[in-house]
Amino acid sequence: MNKLKYLWPLAALLFFVLVSSAYTISETEQVVVTQFGKPVGEARINPGLYFKVPFIQVANYFPKNLLEWDGDPGQIPTKDKTFIWVDTFARWRIVDPLKYFETVNNEQSAMARLDDIIDPAVRNFITSNHLIESVRMSNRELDTFEDFGTESGKNEQEMENQNNRQPNPVTIGRAKIAQGILEAAKPKLAGFGIELVDVKIKRINYVEEVRDSVYGRMIAERRQIAEKFRSEGRGEASKIEGETEKELKQISSEAYRSAQEIMGKADGEATRIYAEAFNRDPEFYSFFKTLEIYKETLDKENSLILTTDSELFRYLKEHK
């Protein structure tokens, strides 16, 4: 019984030592084991269960997946003396954790090394090329302005349209500049156990000093385009109004002609009917026409002086 009393603490101590000596590595991790701050053996990069000397050795974990570097936007002059703000980002990973531990040791120090190496490479390539190289990918003809929503999108589109009017053609382009930055910085980071995977230009913008003039030029161009559309609209409206007036006159002329034709036919038909009716009794026709003359000439306001043997009084005499 007394032996068991001492075995339980010993077993607990052994279990604690065993647990302290074991460590696991996942798929996204890699480990450098250190003893009193110095690396011991090779780095462990494969996932699994591993053991170390408890209390003396320490497992230092480092990520195996891609990491992000986001540079601070900086003001850089181009080869054609245009000052622009350039914002870049990069993706990197730790490929040699032992060298990484011995040189930079932690992610904060690694970021400082990335700043020191990538930022000068970006500046060198931007200053060595014209603005058009940093903005455009090729010499493809640009379409008409579209609404890009954001201020930076408008500025970059204005840069592209401005550069499209410049005599310097695109010989390198934005993609090759980014690739050149990557190739220039990658070997310098290999000594820190870091692999630079990709570098991209996230945004390019004019500096504040020239932004107002750029906006003024953009407004002037928009007004010019708007005036062009309004002029074309007025011309089209005049054309439509002229065609409408022409069609209206044509319709009115055809309607008047048709009306006159109908009236002529109607008058002819009426004359024919009258002629047929009056031809049956000429005396009645003479009497009827004489009555119409009486109606038109004899009233209270007019006076008519005739001789007594006038033919106009023939029917008055006969019916007196």
Image: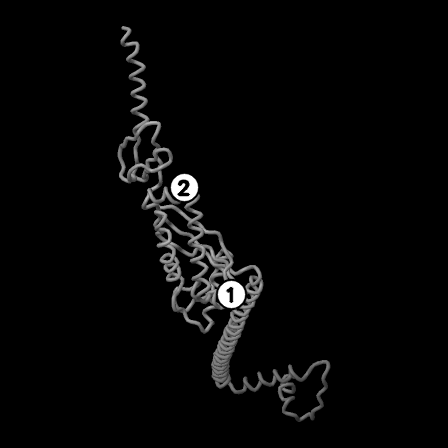
- Look at the picture and state if 248 lies above or below 278: above
Q: Give residue 267's position: percent from left, percent from top.
A: 50, 81
Would you identify the image quadrant in which residue 56 lies? top left
* Above or below, comparing residue 309 to residue 90 in the picture: below
Badge 1 density bin: few <14, some 14–19, many ≥20, Cα 10 Å: some
Estimate the x, y position of residue 277 in percent, counting from the top left: 49, 82
The image quadrant where one finds the C terminus is: bottom right
Is residue 181 shown left or right of residue 152?
A: left
- Of 161 and 96, nearer the camera is 96
Residue drawn where x is 72% and y is 84% of the image? 302
Closest to the camera, between mark 1 and mark 2, is 2
Distance, label 1 to label 2, CA atoms, is 38 Å
Label 2's element? Answer: loop
Q: Amino acid at mark 2?
A: Asn
Residue 19 has which mark?
Answer: none
User: Dot 1: what SS?
Assistant: loop
Image vertical order of residue 155 relative to residue 271, above or below: above
Q: Nearer the viewer, residue 171 or 141?
A: 171
Q: Is residue 280 left or right of residue 212?
A: left
Q: Which residue is mark 2?
A: 106
Q: Position of residue 37 (x, y in %)?
A: 38, 35
Residue annotated with mark 1: 82
Q: Position of residue 172 (x, y in %)?
A: 38, 66
* Vertical position of residue 308 compared to residue 253: above or below: below
* The N terminus lies in quadrant: top left
Seen from the viewer's position, the closer of residues 32 and 132 is 32
